[in-house]
């Protein structure tokens, strides 16, 4: 089957393309830049912008399924930039699916759509946690709009499932962990709050596996069609432990200093106001959204995903750390 993967050149996108190729599928990736890694995998590449409806329509031609993984992520940027990529882009993917008669769409969402939910999220499944309220962060707000729209589009001709992987990490990450390592070595990292808040994460192979498991079960009327699912390793640990374990695997010093949530939130509020007002370059060191994310519990039940499409994490947190350490050492990064 020919499958379109949006954002195939990214961290999760590469894992999806690699896994789909290993399963014998013809894969085409839609992204902004050419990727030598995708070329080496034999993945076709179409370059363009998600907000360009014509480009998305062209990329989807001949596909039998779509893995919509591309999005504008991060904690900083204008609302319009997030809306164009995450909302308009998703609408263009849906329109392309309809126009080309594509029957299956696996949508990569995020647990952030439940940020500030009035119901506690610890240990619950996606069907038990409402969408968040007062989503001030553009990423969370626009991803919530996109997820609602793709799920509402699921019907007899287009089966849709949304997956919410929590904090993906592992070998090949060129964004999250390298930035944490840089800040840790510069002494600019802090634990927000006590660091005892339980959080779950997702090893990259598990995140990809969840997408494949859902895809294989997805069909009109299937148990997973039209629903969203939290995805993780299913091993909640204290934030302090998770952060320092990842840093240790990369050969970076542990984070010992803390900052209270109240102080972090106040700094974040000031940054939220000053960065756009003064047109400051780069991302601010803290935002209100980030302060809340770092200091609150975030762990979810994997039972709905196991029940509806057989997802079971195959790589444990500890095994993932072993692989991560070997990857960084093999690349000559660990010092």
Image (tube, rainbow, N blue to C red):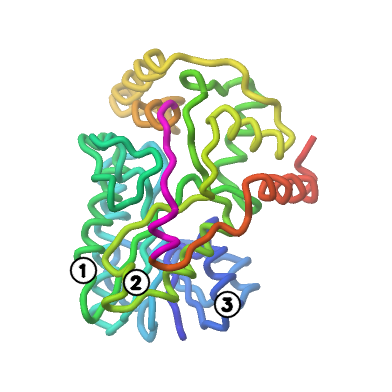
Q: Earlier in the sequence, mark 3 or mark 2?
A: 3
Disc 3 to disc 2, how far (Cα)? 17 Å
Magenta span includes 140: no
Q: Under tag 1, what secondary structure?
A: helix
Residue 63 appears at what percent x and percent y?
39, 82
In the image, 250 versus 315, the foreground residue is 315
Q: How crowded is mark 3: few (under 14 residues within 10 Å), some or many (20 or more)?
A: some
User: With respect to residue 214, does 42 lie above or below?
Assistant: below
User: Measured from the top left, where is residue 140 in percent x and y?
Assistant: 31, 43
Between discs 1 and 3, the one toward the N terminus: 3
Q: Which image quarter holds the C terminus?
A: top right
Q: Which of 12 and 37 is in front in this view?
A: 12
Residue position for label 2: 105
Dot 2 falls on a residue whose secondary structure is strand
The residue that appears at 53% across and 16% down in the rendered structure is 258
- In the image, residue 119 sits, relative to residue 108, either above or below, namely above
The image quadrant of residue 184 is top right
Mark 2: give few (<14), some (14-19) or many (20+) Cα within 10 Å.
Answer: many
Give the tally of numbered discs: 3
Residue range corresponding to the magenta coloring: 295-307
Q: Which residue shows up at 26% across the image and 70% down it?
A: 94
Dividing the picture into quarters, in which one does residue 31 lie? bottom left
Nearer mark to the viewer, of 1 and 3:
1
292 versus 31 height, above or below = above
Using the image, determine if residue 30 lies above or below residue 238. Answer: below
Reading the chain from its start, which is encountered first: label 2 or label 1? 2
* Residue 47 visible in the picture: no
Give how far across and how far down residue 81 sits, in percent: 30, 47
Q: Name the residue under label 1.
A: 153
Kindly identify which numbered label has been placed on residue 21.
Answer: 3
Q: Do the residues labelled 2 and 1 touch (CB within 8 Å)?
A: yes
């Amino acid at each position: 089957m020919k499958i379109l993967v949006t954002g195939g050149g990214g961290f999760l996108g590469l894992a999806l393309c690699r896994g789909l190729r290993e399963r014998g599928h013809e894969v085409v990736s839609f992204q902004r830049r050419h990727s030598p890694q995708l070329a080496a995998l034999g993945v076709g590449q179409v370059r363009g912008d998600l907000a360009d409806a014509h480009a998305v329509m062209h990329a989807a031609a001949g596909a039998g399924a779509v893995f919509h993984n591309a999005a504008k992520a991060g904690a900083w940027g204008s609302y319009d930039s997030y809306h164009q990529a995450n909302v308009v882009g998703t609408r263009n993917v849906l329109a392309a699916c309809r126009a080309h008669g594509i029957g299956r769409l696996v949508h990569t969402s995020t647990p952030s759509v439940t940020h500030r939910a009035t119901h506690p999220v610890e240990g619950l499944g996606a069907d038990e946690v409402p969408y968040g309220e007062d989503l001030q962060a553009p990423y969370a707000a626009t991803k919530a709009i996109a997820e609602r729209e793709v799920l509402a589009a699921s019907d007899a001709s287009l089966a849709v499932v949304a997956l919410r992987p929590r904090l993906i990490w592992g070998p090949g990450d060129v964004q999250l962990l390298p930035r944490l390592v840089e800040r840790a070595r510069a002494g600019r990292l802090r634990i927000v709050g006590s660091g005892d808040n339980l959080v779950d994460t997702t090893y990259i192979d598990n995140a990809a596996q969840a997408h494949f498991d859902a895809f294989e079960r997805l069909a009109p009327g299937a148990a997973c069609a039209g629903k969203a699912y939290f995805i993780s390793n299913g091993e909640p640990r204290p934030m302090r432990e998770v952060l320092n374990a990842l840093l240790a695997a990369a050969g970076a010093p542990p984070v010992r200093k803390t900052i209270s949530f109240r102080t972090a939130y106040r700094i974040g509020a000031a940054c939220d106001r000053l960065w756009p007002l003064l047109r400051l370059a780069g991302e601010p060191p803290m935002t209100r959204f980030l302060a809340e994310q770092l200091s609150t519990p975030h762990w979810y039940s994997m039972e709905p995903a196991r029940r509806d499409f057989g997802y079971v994490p195959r790589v444990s947190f500890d095994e993932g750390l072993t692989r991560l350490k070997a990857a960084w050492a093999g690349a000559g990064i660990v010092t």
